Image (cartoon, rainbow, N blue to C red):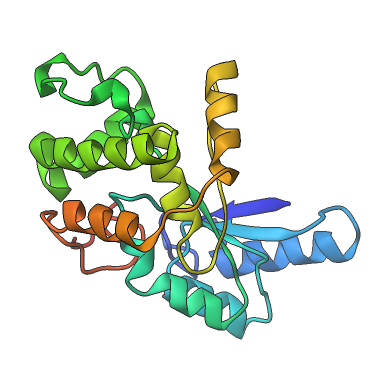
Amino acid sequence: MVQLHWEPPQQQPGPANRIPGFVAAAKALQQLQQRGLVGAVGVSNFDQRMLMALLDAGVKPVSNQVSYSVMDRRPSLFLARFCEARGIPLLAYGTLGGGLLSERYLDVPANMVRIDTVSKARYGTLLKQLGGWSWMQDLLRVLHEVGEKHGVSASCVAARWVLQQPNVAAVVLGARNATHTRDAQRLFSFELDEIDLLDIDAAYEGAHQPTTDVYAWERGGSW
């Protein structure tokens, strides 16, 4: 599968460049697929407007990979239902918030956290928008408590939460070592029950709630 990510999200080429719009790029990938050179065509960080433009042009992606986590719930506002109604499953990245959704950061002061990766920097900025480090600690504490109940890590609970959301087909997880791999395998050893989900939602409630579609804020739009 080849995934198309488009930034900025214009459909037509801008006056200062000769880059075609994302619809033309998607059609080119579709032609490669028809020739047997590409197995499938998916997209990443496409919002409803961009997806509708593709569908109107006769291009239906097999999936849409977006940032989706227990702290970044923007897909649940509009996109998940939109995609489900059109048979486009979601693939979730950023499920662990760049690694911040881990017991490693529970009860750790904000000034002791090393932002040593691009991913941590991205989700650290997102975290500030949502409610800051103290809000994050409340969420981590609940994830940890739910994890203890099921015998898994807080990270595993965070990933499992995303898997149980409507129209999510898979989560994308990074694994740097065997411990991470074993932890990921435990995703399928349990399910979050109604009480777990309510507890997690209660911890999230203190967040600065987003009102826009996926990736709108990153593209300079409102939260």
Query: Where residue 35 sits: x, y (%)?
Result: 90, 61
Q: Residue at x 41, y 31 (%)?
A: 153
Given the current orientation, which residue lies at the most extreme front position? Answer: 149
Please tell me whether residue 69 is drawn above or below residue 181 in the rendered image: below
Instruction: Return the residue nearer the eye: 138 or 31.
Output: 138
Q: Residue at x 52, y 73 (%)?
A: 51
Count up the numbered dots.
0
Please tell me whether residue 65 is drawn above or below residue 109 in the rendered image: below
- Residue 74 vs residue 136: left or right? right
Q: Is residue 144 visible?
A: yes
- Residue 89 vs residue 132: left or right? right
Q: Residue at x 52, y 47 (%)?
A: 190
- Residue 43 vs residue 16: left or right? right
Q: Is residue 67 visible?
A: no
Which image quadrant for residue 15? bottom left
Query: Where residue 7 sits: x, y (%)?
Result: 44, 53
